[in-house]
Image: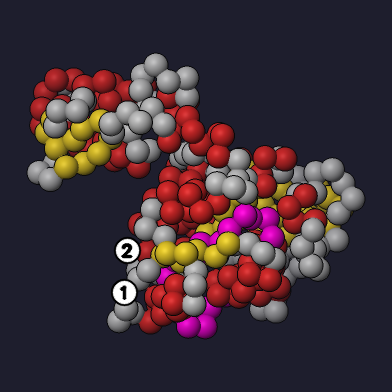
Amino acid sequence: MAIRKIGKENREYPDILRHIYNAPGALFTDGEILASDSNAIAIVGTRRPTDYGLRQCEKLSFDLAVRGVIVVSGMALGIDSAAHRGAIKAGGRTIAVLGSGHNNIYPPENRKLYGEIVKNGAVVSEYPPDMPPLKVNFPKRNRIISGMSKGVVVIEAPGRSGALITANFALEQGREVFAMPGNVSSAKSSGANRLIKEGARLVEDVMDILEELKHVMDIKETEIVLSKPALDNPGFETAISARERKVFEVLSDTPKSIDEISKIIDVPVNKISEELLKLELKKFIKALPGENFIRVPHA
């Protein structure tokens, strides 16, 4: 662990954060902060999500990260952790904002995740390394989560939630607020659903975010994946593994079943299934009924 103190006057201090009200005077940082990290979206939500919330969060985070967008969250259990994991799985960057010092990682269950985030971005805190995880620190740190982002997405937040505090900070800072709708009978979704009623942009997929923020975000990096997912695309090679490519090359605009793909490339169905899921998350292929798959049509 190599913690560095980055003062507000330092060039490494995130410029997007520098201009918010009550910006932290310094950030204690483990990992690397880049100038491009201002191209960020925060994803926050409940610590006790449903399976649906976790899946949707990880997919949305993956879809953002694979397009070059940095994912910011608070490294809490539940939605925050899923947001970081989705970005890491996509090979993208993610930033976690702690409500404690780096020597008191909270929650302790996320020590391994902490290490993965540092390798793929940074973990930051306004608190010195020995600061314990005091309850009063966490609502305050939420202004940094929103302050480092161009917009905040809320997924599964109950009526009283730290995620809603982050959304309020976002509004005060002039950031866009998004919310993913949830089960109307679930208390875990009441806060997110209320945000939509009050004017937050409803999010069904990544394009709802990118379309809304295209005037303030650097979408140039995302065009590699958003446009033609073709073998001759220069960005394709960096976005796909050798095993994924082998599966992708078998597919066309004519649907093929998972069994057909397995026979053509002589790989067991269970292995094919893993690669198909990765390709689908990256928007290179589309799943059809009956476990059939096609390439995503070229733009």
Q: In which quarter of the image is residue 289?
A: top left
Disc nearer the start of the sequence (2/1): 2
Q: Residue at 77% across / 63% down in the picture?
A: 20
Q: Which of marks 2 and 1 is in front?
A: 1
The answer to whether residue 260 is visible is yes
Q: Where is residue 208 in the image (x, y as percent from the top left)?
A: 43, 54
Could you say where residue 226 lies in the image, as x and y percent from the top left?
Answer: 43, 36
47 vs 256, left or right, is right
Residue at (80, 44) in percent of width and height? 12
Q: What element carries label 2?
A: helix
Residue tagged by mark 1? 183
Residue type at the position of mark 1:
Asn
Q: Find disc 2 in the rendering and name its residue.
A: 52
Q: Is mark 1 on a helix, strand or loop?
A: loop
- Choose top left, top right, bottom left or bottom right for residue 236: top left
Residue visible at 55% across and 46% down in the picture: 214
What residue range appears in magenta? 147-162
Residue 74 drawn at (x, y percent): 59, 62
Q: What separation in Å lies between label 2 and label 1 (alpha carbons)? A: 10 Å
Kind of residue at badge 2:
Tyr
Residue 295: numbered disc: none
